[in-house]
Image: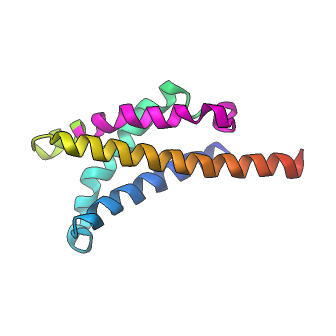
Amino acid sequence: MLTLLIFGDVITLMLVTLFGFSTHGTLPSAGTRVLTTFVPLVLSWFLVAPLLGAYNLGWAADLRQLWRPFWAMVVAGPFATWMRGMWLSAPIIPIFVLVLGGISALAILAWRIIYWLIVSRSKRAYG
């Protein structure tokens, strides 16, 4: 189940990145520029999420613990924008910090609810 959790997190962050580029109308021409957002987002997530227990399988399967991945992304979002700014030698725009962190946190929360549904149904089916 840990593999599913990690895979889902990475896919979710990729979708957030692609969504961001598409809302700016730059997705068709983005090419590898997508990596300038995706890589820092994933790196910051995997540095912060384990510290807040987002990969504890017992907590990941507990609906009451969904605050963990949400708040992990709230913390990871600003870190990701900082890494992106350093990578691109570009200023860090405060609204971008809020949007990237907020949308990513909501997306991770949505994915983790789906994960919880999968795990809870699996427990009911197999005891």
Left or right of 21 in this view: 117: right
> Residue lying farthest bottom?
28
User: How did the renderer colour the structure?
Assistant: rainbow
> Residue lying farthest right?
127
Left or right of 100 in this view: 71: right
Residue at (18, 39) in percent of width and height: 94
Q: What quarter of the picture does the N terminus occupy?
A: top right
Left or right of 98 in this view: 115: right
Bounds of the magenta segment: 57-81
Left or right of 10 in this view: 31: left
Q: How many marks?
A: 0
Q: Is residue 55 above or below residue 112?
A: above
> Is 63 contained in the magenta span?
yes
Magenta stretch mostly in which secondary structure?
helix
Q: What quarter of the picture does the C terminus occupy?
A: top right
Q: Is residue 37 above or below residue 30?
A: above
Q: Pinpoint residue 71: horizontal percent, then vertical percent.
A: 45, 32
Q: Pinpoint residue 119: horizontal percent, then vertical percent.
A: 73, 47
Q: Is residue 26 above or below residue 20?
A: below
Residue at (53, 50) in percent of width and height: 110
Q: Pinpoint residue 41: horizontal percent, then vertical percent.
A: 34, 44
Residue at (88, 49) in percent of width and height: 126
> Is 123 contained in the magenta span?
no
- Tell me which corner region of the image, top left, top right, bottom left or bottom right, holds residue 63: top right
